[in-house]
Amino acid sequence: MKYALSSAESVLPAAQVSHSVLHPDWIAAQVRARYPVNGEVTCFLLYRGMNDVYLVQDATAKYALRVWRKTYRDPDDVAYELGFLDFLRERGFPASVAVPQRDGALYFKADTPKACAPSPCMTGHRG
């Protein structure tokens, strides 16, 4: 059995990336910088799929932070979905809606490797 690279394989081929996962510590830092949170912020990856979902928690509340892949939704689709969820909530449907950032924005874009350019959005239940 051969366990070492052959001399012909001394340079590894570059793999294509179709889905990257954001580090929970980076998400927590972004949440602290962008959202009106209370106390320490923790974050961990809850679900990986078409959207990655992170559980974000501060001293008083828990939130879901969803990351859309660039190949799945463009920003106009994200904005429409968030508006529709708020429309449902206003009519009494218990929808999770976007939590506004300090500047009022409902989501932000992040520069990530290769084909993945997520738009993170933190959601929770309001009133």
Image (cartoon, rainbow, N blue to C red):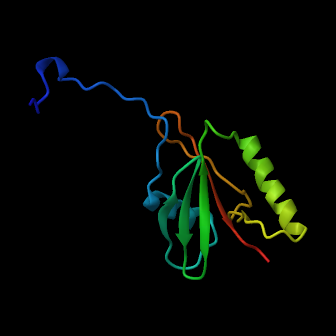
Establish if 71 lies above or below 53: above
Query: Which residue is pictured at 61% across the width and 38% down the height?
Result: 70
Residue reaching furthest to the left: 1
Establish if 72 lies above or below 33: above
Query: Which residue is pictured at 46% across the width and 60% down the height?
Result: 24
Q: Is residue 40 left or right of residue 122?
A: left
Q: Nearer the viewer, residue 119 or 69?
A: 69
Q: Check the picture and name the quadrant holding the C terminus.
A: bottom right
Q: Check the picture and name the quadrant holding the N terminus.
A: top left
Q: In this view, does 38 lie to the left or right of 11?
A: right
Residue 126 position, x and y percent, is: 76, 74
Residue 26 position, x and y percent, is: 46, 57
Residue 121 position, x and y percent, is: 65, 57
Q: Is residue 71 left or right of residue 16?
A: right
- Quadrant of residue 38 in the image? bottom right
Residue reaching furthest to the right: 91
Residue reaching furthest to the bottom: 60
Query: Which residue is pictured at 10% across the width and 29% down the height?
Result: 2
Q: How many labels does the image show?
A: 0
Q: Is residue 66 left or right of residue 79?
A: left
Query: Which residue is pictured at 61% across the width and 36% down the height?
Result: 71
- Quadrant of residue 7 in the image? top left
Residue reaching furthest to the front: 1
Residue 14 position, x and y percent, is: 34, 27
Establish if 9 lies above or below 58: above
- Quadrant of residue 34 in the image? bottom right
